[in-house]
Image (spheres, rainbow, N blue to C red):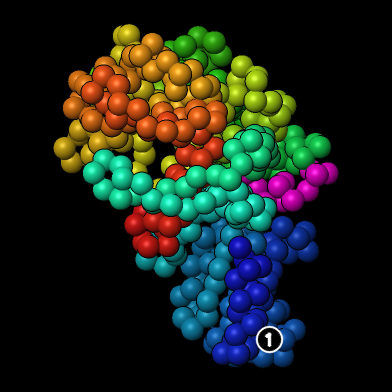
């Protein structure tokens, strides 16, 4: 993203090309230098000492001790200069920027790729056809596909490799995805100095806990069961969960009951990876018939919703049933939609027996419609007073990702 921004600046005639600087703080030559010293060296090298109008990009800024203080001083000292800093340690950046950069820093979170972005970057847009449907009484933007088998093949690749641009364009990295993602992403967040910012001393224990969460991704877990399994006390595990979420590796989701009521004490959660390819990195790539694959389909769909910063779906669970995704009206605390995620065509062929929990939840909460994902079946059916829309999981994942990006463009987070 920084390179793209620099490219656009260089293409504009209003920007002095010699006033665009890119500095990678990870370079050992810069370890003992402050940001102001680096900015001075850049101006000296360019032969333009006047700081006004410069665009200065600092990459991997978390490698500089007290970077937030250095950046704050630069912003205050050079009001006519643009400073852009990036780092791969989201938790550390968020913590420090909120502490020292109030009113000075603007944060931009760059999540892993949506399936929509993956399709776009791979030049596969010909597989999708944009259309509209009448859904819940209004016209909604929708997509269908010209070839569901081919789209599903790319969907499987997205689940295994699709989170990061470097991976999707490199067969070499895909052949050893664990080495790339684990060393460049996971280890950078889990095994270096960053956890200490959150008071975490035992990074090996944190790493083991994360691996456990990855294995149970998409399943409901409780602090009680995790504590029993790991031998780590619940308060420590809660701290680990908070850190992993701040580091943007996981997202924990709270549940509601069959009446759409929140639980006063949330002791059970579903934990999702921010991108399913993290699982492939720690274990191995999955095939469409593996037992764990449906959980990764659910993870992939939920990951698209994570791009909507101010909205998180819930899941509903009660004694005899569960619904995978529920959208709540936060003011009225009433369900406004429900989605059942399936990597099978059985609900399409036999909805009465396969969707009992969904029917129960919708009728109890006066929902007149619901979405059910499948492998490759699509269409409408009216069952038990509920209008069901069946849509292939790959298409639904694409639609949610597409709408998430379009909402960002329109300023609707």
Q: Please give left or right for residue 232 compared with residue 264 in the image.
A: right
At x 63%, y 74%, the residue is 6
Say if 291 sits above or below 247 in the image.
above
Q: Which residue is drawn at 54% across and 37% down?
A: 394
Q: Can you give x and y, in whole percent of width and height, for residue 232 in the image? A: 52, 16
Quadrant the N terminus occupies:
bottom right
Residue 409 in picture, x, y percent from top left: 42, 62
Q: In this view, does 183 lie above or below 382?
A: below
Residue at left offset 68%, top offset 26%: 286
Vertical arrangement, residue 53 with respect to residue 281, above or below: below
Describe the element under mark 1 as helix, strand or loop. helix
The magenta-colored residue range is: 163-173
> Badge 1 is on which residue?
18
Is residue 78 rendered magenta in the image?
no
Q: Nearer the viewer, residue 81 or 351?
A: 351
SS assignment for the magenta stretch, majority: helix
């Amino acid at each position: 993203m920084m390179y793209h921004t620099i490219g656009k600046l260089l293409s504009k005639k209003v920007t002095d090309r010699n006033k665009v600087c890119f500095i990678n703080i990870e370079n050992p030559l810069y370890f003992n230098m402050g940001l102001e010293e680096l900015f001075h060296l850049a101006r000296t090298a360019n032969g333009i000492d006047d700081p006004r109008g410069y665009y200065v990009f600092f990459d991997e800024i978390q490698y500089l001790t007290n970077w937030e203080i250095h950046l704050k001083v630069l912003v205050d000292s050079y009001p006519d200069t643009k400073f852009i800093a990036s780092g791969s340690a989201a938790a550390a950046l968020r913590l420090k920027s909120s502490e020292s950069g109030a009113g000075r820093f603007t944060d931009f979170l760059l999540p892993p790729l949506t399936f929509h972005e993956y399709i776009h970057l791979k030049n596969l847009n010909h597989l999708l056809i944009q259309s509209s449907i009448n859904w819940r009484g209004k016209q909604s933007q929708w997509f269908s596909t010209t070839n569901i088998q081919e789209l599903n093949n790319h969907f499987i690749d997205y689940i295994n490799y699709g989170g990061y641009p470097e991976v999707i364009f490199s067969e070499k990295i895909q052949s050893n995805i664990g080495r790339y993602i684990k060393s460049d992403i996971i280890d950078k967040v889990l095994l270096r100095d960053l956890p200490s910012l959150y008071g975490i001393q035992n990074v090996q224990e944190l790493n083991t806990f994360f691996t456990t969460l990855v294995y149970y991704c998409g399943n409901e877990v409780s602090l009680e069961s995790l504590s029993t399994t790991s031998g780590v006390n619940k308060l420590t595990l809660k701290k680990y969960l908070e850190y992993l979420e701040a580091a943007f590796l996981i997202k924990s989701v709270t549940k509601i009951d069959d009446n759409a009521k929140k639980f006063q004490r949330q002791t059970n959660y579903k934990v999702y990876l921010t991108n399913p390819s993290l699982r492939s990195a720690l274990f191995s790539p999955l095939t469409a018939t593996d037992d764990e694959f449906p959980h990764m389909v659910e993870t992939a769909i939920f990951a698209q919703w994570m791009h909507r910063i101010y909205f998180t779906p819930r899941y509903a669970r009660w004694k005899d049933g569960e619904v995978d995704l529920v959208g709540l009206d936060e003011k009225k605390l009433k369900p406004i939609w429900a989605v059942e995620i399936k990597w099978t065509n059985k609900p399409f062929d036999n909805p009465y027996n396969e969707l009992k929990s969904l029917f129960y939840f919708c009728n109890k909460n006066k929902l007149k419609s619901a979405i059910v994902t499948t492998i490759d079946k699509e269409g409408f059916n009216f069952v038990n007073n509920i209008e069901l829309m069946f849509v292939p999981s790959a298409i639904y994942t694409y639609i949610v990702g597409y709408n998430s990006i379009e909402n960002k463009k329109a300023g609707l987070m």
